[in-house]
Image: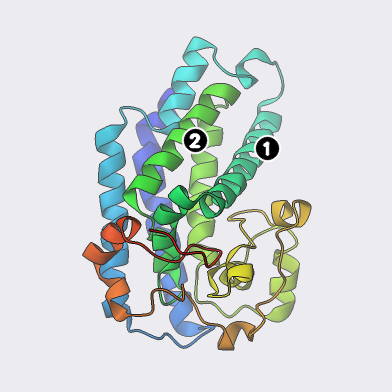
């Protein structure tokens, strides 16, 4: 099974990415939540260029990504799950939950540690919030995230199909919950009992530090409720809130070169403290 998954991994990931991206992009035009402060043609080229750079960097640096690491762990018998005999469906559920909790805490770590925040703030410096924001992560952050995931795969030993499922879910739901989408209030309330919705995650992209440092989840909302980081709504409302970081309000923030160099500039951190 793992060999089949690995042989079709690229097709599965690319198909899911392209399909969800197209659906969310079209839905944003039909049911927008907010009026953009900048045209798409100013922001989207750099945001999409970043995901191309990130993908190329990962392929160059890692002979095995997380799914390949899971296959290797299964062959060698590494990791907790490979020592236990239990139904495949149970392993699938537990692996997805474990990785989702890991990504939640990784996200909190990248806000709490100044060195990591230097990398992650490129994501938050976007002056608008739409599906392309989900792609805007610094290459060094992507490398660190992959190292964390590979380490977790080696420790847990989940099946390759579980890792692939989680990565497809993470990527797809990130595009959905970064969408500039107006969901009916009743639908949003129902979905956010389990899944991160655009209104749920948009709070996290507020310029207010207390809101930036909340709602860290990408897939499941349970972790924010469980660990006290949930904030229901932005203080200024979804239409009135300002997106981004106070230190970066210039349209140059949408330029690719500026984005790549941002971690090496002095700035305010996510708590409003001056860094150098």
Q: Residues within 10 Å of mark 2 (few under 14, many from 20)?
A: many
Q: Quadrant of residue 97?
A: top right
Instruction: Identify which residue, 136 or 207, lies in the foreground.
Output: 207
Residue located beneath label 1 in the image: 93
Q: Which mark is residue 74?
A: none
* SS at badge 1: helix
Residue under the image location 48 percent in, 83 percent down: 30
Taking the view exactly as shown, the residue that stands out farthest to the top is 76
Position in image of residue 164 (x %, y %): 49, 38
Q: Quadrant of residue 271?
A: bottom right
Left or right of 172 in this view: 197: right
Residue located beneath label 2 in the image: 149
Position in image of residue 25 (x %, y %): 42, 72
* SS at badge 2: helix
Note whether 157 is above or below 31 in the view shown: above
User: Where's the C terminus, which quadrant?
Assistant: bottom left
Position in image of residue 159 (x %, y %): 55, 27
Residue under the image location 70 percent in, 65 percent down: 191
Contact, CB < 8 Å: mark 1 with mark 2? Answer: no
Left or right of 275 in this view: 104: right
Residue under the image location 59 percent in, 67 percent down: 201
Residue under the image location 46 percent in, 76 percent down: 246
Q: Is residue 118 visible?
A: yes
Q: CA distance from mark 1 to mark 2?
A: 17 Å
Which sits earlier in the primary sequence, circle 1 or circle 2?
1
Instruction: Identify which residue, 106 or 221, lies in the foreground.
Output: 106
């Amino acid at each position: 099974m793992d060999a089949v998954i690995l042989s079709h991994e690229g097709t599965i990931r690319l198909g899911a990415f392209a399909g969800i991206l197209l659906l969310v992009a079209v839905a944003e035009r039909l049911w927008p939540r907010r009026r953009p402060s900048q045209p798409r043609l100013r922001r989207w080229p750099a945001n999409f260029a970043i995901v191309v750079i990130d993908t190329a960097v990962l392929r160059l640096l890692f002979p095995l990504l997380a799914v390949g690491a899971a296959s290797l762990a299964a062959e060698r018998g590494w990791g907790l799950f490979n020592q236990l005999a239990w139904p495949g469906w149970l392993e699938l559920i537990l692996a997805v939950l474990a990785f989702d909790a890991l990504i939640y805490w990784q996200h909190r770590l990248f806000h709490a540690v100044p060195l990591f925040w230097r990398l992650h703030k490129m994501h938050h410096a976007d002056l608008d919030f739409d599906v392309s924001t989900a792609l805007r992560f610094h290459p060094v952050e992507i490398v660190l995230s992959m190292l964390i995931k590979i380490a977790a795969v080696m420790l847990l030993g989940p099946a390759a199909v579980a890792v692939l499922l989680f990565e497809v879910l993470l990527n797809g739901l990130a595009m959905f919950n970064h969408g500039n989408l107006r969901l009916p209030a009743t639908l949003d309330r129902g979905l956010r009992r389990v899944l991160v919705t655009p209104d749920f995650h948009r709070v996290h992209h507020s310029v207010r530090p207390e809101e930036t440092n909340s709602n860290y989840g990408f897939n499941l909302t349970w972790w924010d409720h469980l660990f006290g980081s949930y904030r229901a709504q932005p203080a200024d409302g979804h239409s009135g809130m300002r997106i981004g970081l106070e230190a970066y309000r210039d349209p140059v923030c949408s330029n690719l070169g500026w984005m790549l160099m941002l971690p090496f500039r002095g700035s305010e951190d996510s708590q409003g403290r001056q860094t150098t």
